[in-house]
Amino acid sequence: MSESPEHNFGQELERLEKRLDELVVICGQLKEENRSLKERQDSLIADRATLLQKNEQVRARVEAMISRLKAMEHGT
């Protein structure tokens, strides 16, 4: 016995509704993941800027020490 076209249509509609619900959930998960990744990226960018600034400060201090050592060397 063959199923009626209406029954087949109803089953297909239910299958599509379930799939749509799954896609809505996945979309929500992706939005949350994207938000979290953007937040993490912002944090890493800020950390990088801080590290670059500290690196520049250390470089300047080392250069100053080298200059003082050279001055002491030439002064003796």
Image: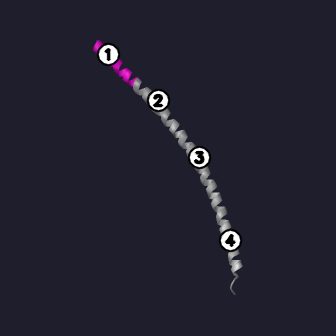
Q: Which residue is mark 2?
A: 54
Residue 73 magenta-drawn?
yes
* 2 or 4: mark nearer the eye: 4
Instruction: Work out whether mark 4 precedes mark 1 in sequence or the reverse, and give the earlier one.
Output: 4
Q: Residues within 10 Å of mark 1 (few under 14, many from 20)?
A: few
Secondary structure type for disc 3: helix
Secondary structure type for disc 1: helix
Q: Which residue is mark 4?
A: 13
Boundaries of the magenta span: 61-75
Question: Marks 1 and 2, Cα distance to the nearest angstrom?
Answer: 26 Å
Secondary structure type for disc 2: helix
Spot occupied by residue 45 in the image (x, y as percentages of width and height):
51, 39
The quadrant where residue 17 appears: bottom right
Residue type for callout 3: Ser
Taking the spot 50% from the left edge, 32% from the top edge, the residue there is: 50
Towards the viewer: 15 or 68:
15
* 3 or 1: mark nearer the eye: 3
Instruction: Work out whether mark 1 precedes mark 2 in sequence or the reverse, and give the earlier one.
Output: 2
Q: Residues within 10 Å of mark 3 (few under 14, many from 20)?
A: few
Towards the viewer: 71 or 52:
52
